[in-house]
Image (spheres, grey):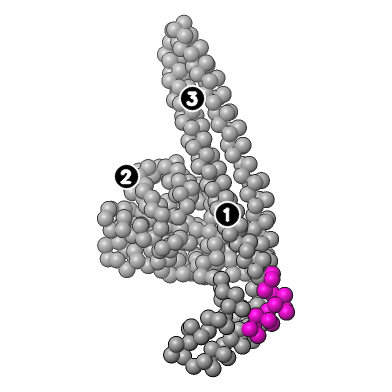
Amino acid sequence: MTTNSDLKFLIVDDFSTMRRIVRGLLKEIGYNNAEEAEDGSVALNMLKSSKFDFVVSDINMPVMNGFELLSAIKKDDTLKHLPVLMVTAEARKEDIVRAAQDGAAGYIVKPFTKATLEEKVQKIMQKLAATA
Amino acid sequence: MIKMDELECLAPQMAAGASPEVFHQLGLITRQLHDTLTQLGVMPKLQQAADGLPDARSRLNYIAQKTGAAADKVLNLVDRAKSEHQSISSETRRIAAAIVADPVKAVASGAVMNFVGDVESSTERIDRHLTEIMMAQDFHDLTGQVVAKVVSLASELEDSLVKLLVQAAPPEAATKVEAAVLQGPVVSYEGRTDVVQNQGEVDDLLASLGF
């Protein structure tokens, strides 16, 4: 397995427990560099003020939800290259389709396993490497 | 809250610049609505359900606190147990290398027996962490009981509001139910074709769209 532990992740979720779980799983699969944001608005400010390589975001959050964050990232010329992996309890097909159409790099429904997260992150990394 | 009997007293004060006839008509309509709802039995039930809302709020806060504390506790204990495991793992590699290099010296120096003692202590600590993790799951029983009470209250409130809606809303509006923008976790998949049930279905859906 090839991983790049220097890559910086931003984990966006209003539940600190879930942020901690995602952070722990990322660490286990080789990504040690991660920061956290409790909603889309905080995340957007962090993305604009610091360099990140990957965003893992929930959808249902207060202030600015995951769809709004995804849209804001894709509209921003300096951020639109960032892969955004949605990790959410939203299981409606229309939400999944919307996320894909809005530019999400992947979609994981909760509850999920470490293997699923690892597979999706690796797949996105491989796509990025192929298009770079 | 303003009571029905107080409305008529308030009306003249509020009527500055407005037609007394308008307020009279409004008063009659309000009185009719109040009487109708009372006759239907909606008002007492609605009042009863509304009175229970602060209690439901505190119960839901309790659930949030209880589950949050349990999650934190478990994650902290897992961190500690993993740290113990890593320690055993690295010590095992170290003592194995020492035995391979010089078995007599490894035993004579006490390194092997020290290792055995360390492993025993470490596994006892891990066992305690596992027991605490098991005990932390007690939130499920406690919050389950509270959830049942909140669900009961919500059902009463829903029942009253549906009756009120049916009475008050125009026919075309009464049947129109707006779906929430975001639904959250799916509690029951029965009869639903608009949601996916697992990650495999998510992947299939995205693949069918060319992603």
Q: Marks 3 and 1: in contact by CB < 8 Å?
A: no
Circle 1 residue: B58
Asked whether the residues under marks 1 and 3 belong to the same chain, the reply is yes
Q: Which chain carries label 3?
A: B
**Quadrant where the N terminus of chain A is found in the figure:** top left
Residue situated in front as seen by the camera: B90 or B19 = B19
The stretch in magenta equals B31-45
Judge whether residue B43 is colored magenta. yes
State the mark number for residue B88: 3
Element under disc 2: loop
Judge whether residue B196 is colored magenta. no
**Other residues around mark 1 within 10 Å, as few (<14) / some (14–19) / many (≥20):** few
Query: Which residue sits at x=45%, y=55%?
Result: A14
Magenta stretch secondary structure, dominant: helix
Residue B141 x, y percent position in the rendering: 66, 46
Query: Which residue sits at x=65%, y=69%?
Result: B47
Element under disc 3: helix
Q: What residue type is labelled 2?
A: Asp
Residue B181 x, y percent position in the rendering: 51, 70
Asked whether the residues under marks 2 and 3 belong to the same chain, the reply is no
**Other residues around mark 3 within 10 Å, as few (<14) / some (14–19) / many (≥20):** some
Q: Which amino acid does label 3 sit on?
A: Ile
Residue situated in front as seen by the camera: B53 or B144 = B53
**Quadrant where the C terminus of chain A is found in the figure:** bottom left
Q: Marks 3 and 2: in contact by CB < 8 Å?
A: no
Cα–Cα gap, marks 1 and 3: 45 Å
Residue A16 x, y percent position in the rendering: 46, 49
